[in-house]
Image (spheres, helix red, strand yellow):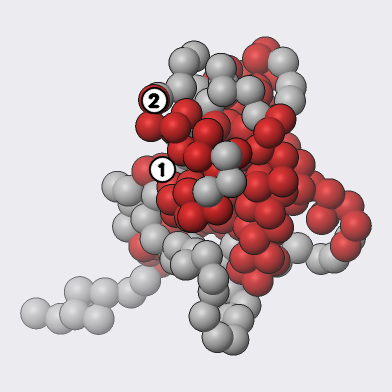
Amino acid sequence: MARSPDEKKLVRRILEGDAEAFRPLVRTYQSPVYHLALRILRNRDDAEDAAQDVFVKVFKALRSYDDRYALKSWILRITHNHCIDQLRKRKHKMLSLDEPFAQGDGETEWELPDPDAVDPLEATLDSELKEMLAAAIARLSPNLQAAITLRHVEGLRYDEIADVLGIPLGTVKVRIFRAREELARLLGGQLGRNKSRGKEKPDPGGSRK
């Protein structure tokens, strides 16, 4: 897939020594990088640190980028690999997405997006369903989380996801299928429990005339 002339021009400017040209690249891709890191690491501070580390890696490795492929996919692959490495190194207890995010002090250099912002997958859901979906995604394995996030949050094609994760196309399809199946099971059970609780609520005025 050919890259756009503007994207190629931007990369060329950076490689020619124009450091300022790196800023629009960061602005363009900071949101998908941050949200993928957040889905994997499940902690706001860790995701912010990871996003900064990723862009440092991108800057240093830009000469190895093959512009026949999507720049976004290449950057997200670096993000995925970096975050998986962080999980392996830290071996810390990952926080659930339905718990409050840790708040950092001061301003962030990358102007990272609000993790509570509506994404394409959640655009038609009310706040309660959003919380349920986030909690359900948090219960998936890291491999399934990454696949479903890249597909439905970042809107990548199956072949792009395969490139990001470094796995065969067939494996991508299997992971997304399993993620959808597991989310349907988790959300279906939760919705059923909520519906049952709603039926049990007494009607304060139901017995009065």
Q: Which is more toward the observer, 134 or 194?
A: 134
Vertical placement of residue 104 versus 169, above or below: below
In the rendered structure, which amino acid carries the disc numbered 1? Answer: Leu
Q: Which is more toward the observer, 32 or 127?
A: 32
Residue at which label 2 appears: 5
Relative placement, left or right, of 124 versus 134 is left
Point out residue 38 in the picture as x, y percentages from the top left corner.
Answer: 61, 57
Vertical placement of residue 116 versus 143, above or below: below
Point out residue 76 in the picture as x, y percentages from the top left corner.
Answer: 61, 39
| Residue 120, image quadrant | top left
Residue drawn at the location 47% of the way across and 29% of the way down: 8
* Camera-side mark, 1 or 2: 2
Relative placement, left or right, of 175 versus 187 is right
Residue at which label 1 appears: 121
Point out residue 154 in the picture as x, y percentages from the top left corner.
Answer: 47, 39
Tag 1's secondary structure? helix
- Mark 1, residues whose alpha carbon is within 10 Å: few (<14), some, or many (≥20)? some
Q: Which is more toward the observer, 189 or 182?
A: 182
- Mark 2, residues whose alpha carbon is within 10 Å: few (<14), some, or many (≥20)? few
Q: Which of marks 1 and 2 is nearer the N terminus?
A: 2
Residue drawn at the location 66% of the way across and 38% of the way down: 62
Residue drawn at the location 49% of the way across and 14% of the way down: 1
| Residue 73, image quadrant | top right
Evaluate whether residue 36 shows in this view.
no
Contact between labelled residues 2 and 1, with CB atoms less than 8 Å apart: no
Q: What is the spatial separation of the Cα atoms under label 1 and label 2, in whole angstroms?
A: 30 Å
Tag 2's secondary structure? helix
Q: In the rendered structure, find residue 153 and report the number of the disc placed on it.
A: none
Relative placement, left or right, of 36 versus 85 is left
Tell me the quadrant of the picture where the C terminus can be found: bottom left
